Image (cartoon, grey):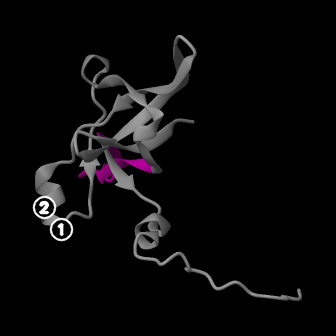
Amino acid sequence: MKCTLQIKQDGGTRIADVQFYFYIRFGDDRHPLAMVSMFSLPDSDVFTESSGTVYLSEPLSASDGLIVIPITTIHSVVSMFPEMRVSDDGGIIETGKFSLMRHAFLELAQFSNGELFEEEEDRVL
């Protein structure tokens, strides 16, 4: 099972599948890195028409999309689901594109003062 990440890159966010994690050492300093396979930027027409809610993209080829990133650029773990369409004969076809799904809690947490849930004292089960 792949781990899909939302990462910070070039002042924005991008989506990537982790291939593996590793360290590189310079003298006594260890630097944690990840080899990732990038997804394209979202389809701009779909993204605009959906008011920024549908992030539909494609995996990039190894020569274009395989990069090494510092793990400090990882923003969150996300999911990418294959886009499917129904053909004229009723069959299901995968388009080769993927749709982003973020955890709703992460979006809500940015508006919180840190107290999303009230703590219950002396709770009896």
| Vertical order, 118 against 49 (above or below) | below
Between 119 and 95, the one nearer to me in the picture: 119
Specify start and end residues of the magenta stretch as a single range.
79-96
Given contact means CB atoms under 8 Å apart, are the residues at marks 2 and 1 in contact? yes
Picture coordinates of residue 53, whole percent (x, y): 26, 64
The outermost residue toward the front is 28
Picture coordinates of residue 34, whole percent (x, y): 47, 27
The outermost residue toward the right is 124
| Vertical order, 99 against 103 (above or below) | above
Query: Crowdedness of circle 1 by 10 Å Cα count: few (<14), some, many (20+)?
Result: few
Q: Is residue 3 magenta?
A: no
Q: Is residue 87 magenta?
A: yes
Say whether residue 43 is visible. Answer: yes
Q: Quadrant of the N terminus?
A: top right
Residue 48's disc number: 2
Real-space Cα separation, disc 2 to disc 1, in angstroms: 5 Å
Picture coordinates of residue 65, whole percent (x, y): 29, 25
Picture coordinates of residue 43, whole percent (x, y): 17, 48
